[in-house]
Image (spheres, coloured by chain):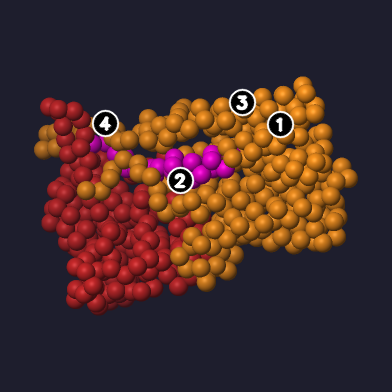
Chain colours: A red, B orange
Amino acid sequence: MTRYVMVADLRRCVGCQTCTAACKHANATLPGVQWRRVLDIEVGEYPDVHRVFVPTGCQHCANPPCMDVCPSTATRQRDDGIVTIDYDICIGCAYCAVACPYDARFKVTDTAFAYGEDAMAHEEKRHDPRRLGVSTKCTFCADKVDAGCAQGLTPGVDPDATPACVNSCIAKALHFGDIDDPDSNVSQVLEENAHFRMHEELGTEPGFYYLWDRK
Amino acid sequence: MTAVGPRLQTAWDWRAAGNFIGGGSGAGLLCAAAIGAVGGGDPRLSTTMALILIAAGLGLVWLEISRPFRFLNVYRQPARSWMTREAYAALPVFAAGATAVWFADPTLTVIAAGFGLIFLYCQARILQAAKGIPTWREPALLPLVIVTGLTEGTGLFVLIAAIGASLPQWAPMLLALWLAARIASGSIYHRRLTDVGCPVRALDELERWKTAFLVLGHMLPFALLALGWLAPPTMGVAAALAAVCAVASGWALKFVIVTRTAHTQGFALLHRPARGPVGSGGGHVKPGWY
């Protein structure tokens, strides 16, 4: 089996938001929508204060609460673990948005572009009116992963089969790959480093791992 | 910068709250109408009002969804979604309820009330399944939503009967019982949130409404009902006023829970990352939580 996951190395992330910009460019998401974003968390009290940058987004949970609540079956899970939304049947009830503990779902009802009424080139090319009034979220660039796999490429290794955010990361903080393959890039970094998943206590089994120290 | 701590959700607004208000009151009113019908009363007015309330609630949801002409897709997921199950439960409620009104039949009213209870249960489970909102996913909210619906419904029944000068003796008693159950379940819910932990701002908001809910929603109606029992000629007016308090406080409670205390989970780190080649990581980080 294949189970795609994302790994974020919190020691490496510099909070540059290049992944956020790459995602917006690749998916032409509307203003206010950030399928990939980086949190800037300030921890501690003066003089012992730390900043932690935390890439986040849809965690493609193995047990996704958004899918359980969806009344229309628009939210589904592929065999490789990627959670998808069928924009043609979503009714825009936003139940998934309140069910997601990762604040990863967005619903926009009106068309707007980053710089006013005129769309930029990538917005013109990738703007999808089917995404208006329905729930949207990170897809792990599933179309790109599928197209890459069809060419015999390896997701997470070959850029043409890898999500845009991972390709763009200047610090190599983001990794993507098949956790069910013990030889994959993600299996190896998880083997070598101490890691955790966010809100695991809720039973969602997120497919997004955070590295925080060496083993 | 993206908010890191819990933030008030904006996906569901007063229209969603309206569904829980209309659905809960309607289902509760159906139950009270069924008890009245079994006791020989005429259930038609109460049942009609109940169906109108449930329909109004569902209508508000229809206004909230942004692809309203796809509303039939709500029926596609009975295996998992409580929203789908709520939509299915509404069908026999209306079928049995409308037939009960047409034939003024107590048995059909009881059947409609049974489906109404299922509908109310589904509504409570809708909130509980929303894992992203800590104050909704708390299991103690389930009995609170159900009891609140039954309290509102009984309150409306008392109000209708008092206005029509046909208040049965059992109705104020049942209202008092539901009020007692509501205050108990509300206090358990509040205690569970503080024990288990929830977003600070959600709990602060609940605290802000607590006294008004206790005094206007429970102590005042109890006092009015007590007055009615001590001075029977005043019972009609006292029960009607108590009912208004019970209904209004229930509606306010649901409005507050859906739109004011509905803070998201926020973000948390089990460990702070290690810094430098010999640095060690830090402990747990969970901003905005008790």
Q: CA distance from mark 3 to mark 2?
A: 25 Å
Q: CA distance from mark 4 to mark 3?
A: 46 Å
Local packing at callout 3 (Cα closer than 10 Å; few below 14, some 14-19, many 20+) is some
- Extreme right residue here? B40
Please determine whether, in this image, residue B107 is positioned above or below residue A196. Answer: below
Disc sitting over residue B283 in the figure = 4
Amino acid beneath label 3: Met
Nearer the N terminus, badge 1 or badge 3?
Answer: 3
Q: CA distance from mark 1 to mark 3?
A: 13 Å
Asked where in the image residue A196 lies, by quadrant, the reply is top left
Look at mark 2 in the image and give the residue it sits on. B259
Amino acid beneath label 4: Gly
Q: Do residues under tags 4 and 3 come within 8 Å of each other at their CB atoms?
A: no
Label 3: element kind? helix
Image coordinates for residue B57, horizontal then vertical, percent: 59, 55
Image coordinates for residue B191, horizontal then vertical, percent: 51, 27
Chain ID at mark 3:
B
Image coordinates for residue B78, horizontal then vertical, percent: 60, 60
Disc sitting over residue B219 in the figure = 3
Disc sitting over residue B238 in the figure = 1
Q: Do residues under tags 1 and 3 come within 8 Å of each other at their CB atoms?
A: no
Label 2: element kind? helix
